[in-house]
Amino acid sequence: MKFTIFQETRRGARQYNQDRMCYSYSRDSLLMVVADGMGGHLHGEVAAQITVELMAELFQKKAKPVIQNPHQFLSDGFEKCHDAILNYAANHSLLETPRTTVVAAIIQDGMLYWAHVGDSRLYLVRDAKLVVRTKDHSKVQQMVDLGRLTEEEAERHPEKNKIYNCLGSMFPPDVEIGGKLPLIDGDTVLLCTDGLWGGVTQPELEQMLTGYPALYALPQLLDRAENRGGVHGDNLTGVAVNWHDEDDTSTELLSTHRLSDGEVTTRLDTLNAHKAIRGNKDISEADIEAAINEIQNAIKKYSK
């Protein structure tokens, strides 16, 4: 496989960042995950952290060097993340279970597979045109589907970010499985949280993701969304990949051909104590360490 990939997250105007992201790839398969944690700090970001870390751990164990059934892998993985979050809440006797949205994609054999829960989105842009955009699991999207709102009205609706489907709720998540689409040279796939997609227009996404490589386009989109969010801006996160033909000889491309059958590379940030407690005196460094230990225990239990 040959591709370029870039990921970035920003706090926006919020006191702390509950978004999480990761990507992981073997010689013949690529996984991308974005999660948007909900619930009071520290718990919302722990739910998102469990999700991205557990999905990456499952991928590392099962990509040998491809995932045998990508859609089943994503669905089963989300279910395990949901159970791990509930287990974390039970162990801490939390009155409110931390929750998170999640969107994930796998690329292998030149095909794109995806699944999502909530309103974190996947976009596929080809030749400056939107080919795929996941539908939010929100009441506003339901109103659009029923013909009560137009897409334009939905984008301005004050309750567009209220969702009914997530990981960690009292109800099992309704995992929406995407399609199976072949990618062609120059395609761009973006996974992002609502802080990003809510601050840019579809034409801007189409233009930026077609006209520029991911490592330039994504920061530019984040800049626009962050500026427009102003003092009320949400966390913003995205993972973007540019797909390339195998015969492309550009030196800046990432090629997985050098990896062995069982080798996997992962880019994932763990909880950072200093960043997490900054500006929040109720969260101690010991709290962070305890959370990290709980996350690792959850991963060990549910990644089997």
Image (tube, rainbow, N blue to C red):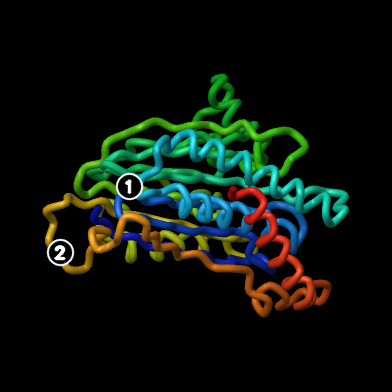
Seen at 26% across and 46% down, the residue is 187
As shown in the figure, which amino acid type bears the numbered disc 1? Glu
- Closer to the camera in the image, 299 or 203: 299
Seen at 43% across and 44% down, the residue is 105
> Nearer the viewer's eye, disc 1 or disc 2?
2
Horizontal side, residue 253 vs residue 173: left or right: left
Seen at 40% across and 63% down, the residue is 265
**Toward which corner of the image does residue 217 lie, by quadrant?**
bottom left
Horizontal side, residue 182 vs residue 235: left or right: left
Say whether residue 250 is visible: yes
Q: Which residue is mark 1?
A: 206
Residue 95 percent location from the top left of the image: 88, 49
Q: Is residue 49 above or below residue 107?
A: below
Q: What is the CA distance from the residue labelled 1 to the residue labelled 2?
A: 23 Å
- Closer to the camera in the image, 39 or 249: 249
Q: Which residue is mark 2?
A: 250
